[in-house]
Amino acid sequence: MLPWIRALRPLTALLLAAAIALVPATTAHAADARPASGWNDYTCKPSAAHPRPVVLVHGTFGNSVDNWLGLAPYLKNRGYCVFSLDYGQLPGVPLFNGLGPVEKSAEQLAAHVDKVLAATGASETDLVGHSQGGMMPRYYLKFLGGAAEVNALVGIAPSNHGTTLSGLTNLLPYFPGVEDLLNGHTPALADQVAGSDLLTKLNAGGDTVPGVRYTVLATKYDEVVTPYRSQFLDGPGVRNVVLQDLCPLDLSEHLAIGLFDRIAFHEVTNALDPAHATPTTCASVFG
């Protein structure tokens, strides 16, 4: 075996292992059944207190159920109509979604938002996404007319400006074939590498579009979307939040912030309803 091939194999394994962490690992069940907790209920009608349905957008290797076993019931129990979707599916790859090209995934999100708005009778929705799910909706907002249908986007550890995967992607030019592997088999991973064509297009001319409020929730312990401040957005209507500024004891990393961090969940509700926001502190885990 040639030396560069021997070097390529561990590098590929490291890249894929880090990429898997872009979103929570799935459990064994399929993501097409309605969760028992009551989200994805298309008979739900938004209340006067929460007039916009919330669409949850999973990340790379996630799905519409497993990514949201913590946050969806949290929001549902607080009176929101909550929906989630699967996107970015690849043929022959069950359960693990968010792998297809970001542009195509944004088209799937656009169709899903239309479906939710038609079912609920609402004129706008709010989007909450984790990792790729916090970045990909920006393509929908910027290029597919989503700004007319979305009031707010909350990104939890979003890959807004790409990731170095803690520097691993800097090695890609030295290993011919790896970038082709990522582009050919998991386009979404290649799209999220810092400096990709997708991210260059997405961020050209400014990070935001008028009429949408943006919130970014980041943890300084993020080991996947690195450096963590690359998650932040610039522009009017943006609020960038580091969880440790709210609670220094919060040790959540990339997965935990989206899976079960109730400090992050509390800050999500503040972003969805800023008129009734309450301070987020370490005590928010009990709320």
Image (cartoon, grey):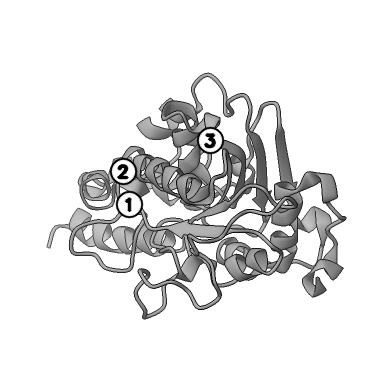
* Picture layout, residue 18 above or below residue 29: above
Frontmost residue, 227 versus 278: 278
- Say which of 142 and 145 sits in front: 145
Secondary-structure class at tag 1: loop
Q: Dividing the image into 4 quarters, which one contains the N terminus?
A: bottom left
Report how far apart the C-alphas of labels 3 and 1 lie in the structure: 21 Å
SS for tag 3? loop
Kindly tell me whether residue 58 is visible in this rendering: no
Question: Would residue 279 appear left or right of 107 to someone viewing this image?
Answer: right
Q: Residue at x 41, y 40 (%)?
A: 110
- The residue labelled by disc 3 is 149
Residue nearest the observer in this picture, 19 or 73: 73
Of the 4 image quadrants, the one containing the C terminus is bottom right
Residue drawn at (63%, 35%) of the image:
233
Amino acid type of the residue that numbered disc 1 sits on in the rendered structure: Gly
Q: Residues within 10 Å of mark 1 (few under 14, many from 20)?
A: many
Look at label 3 and name its amino acid: Glu
Q: Is disc 2 placed on a helix, strand or loop?
A: loop
Q: Position of residue 21 (x, y in %)?
A: 46, 63
Q: CA distance from mark 3 to mark 2?
A: 22 Å
Q: Residues within 10 Å of mark 2 (few under 14, many from 20)?
A: many
Residue under numbered circle 1: 88
Depth check, mark 3 against mark 2: the one in front is 3
Marks 3 and 1: which is nearer the front? 3
Callout 2 amino acid: Pro
Of the numbered discs in the image, which one, if any, rests on residue 101?
Answer: 2
Residue at mark 1 to residue at mark 2: CA–CA distance: 7 Å
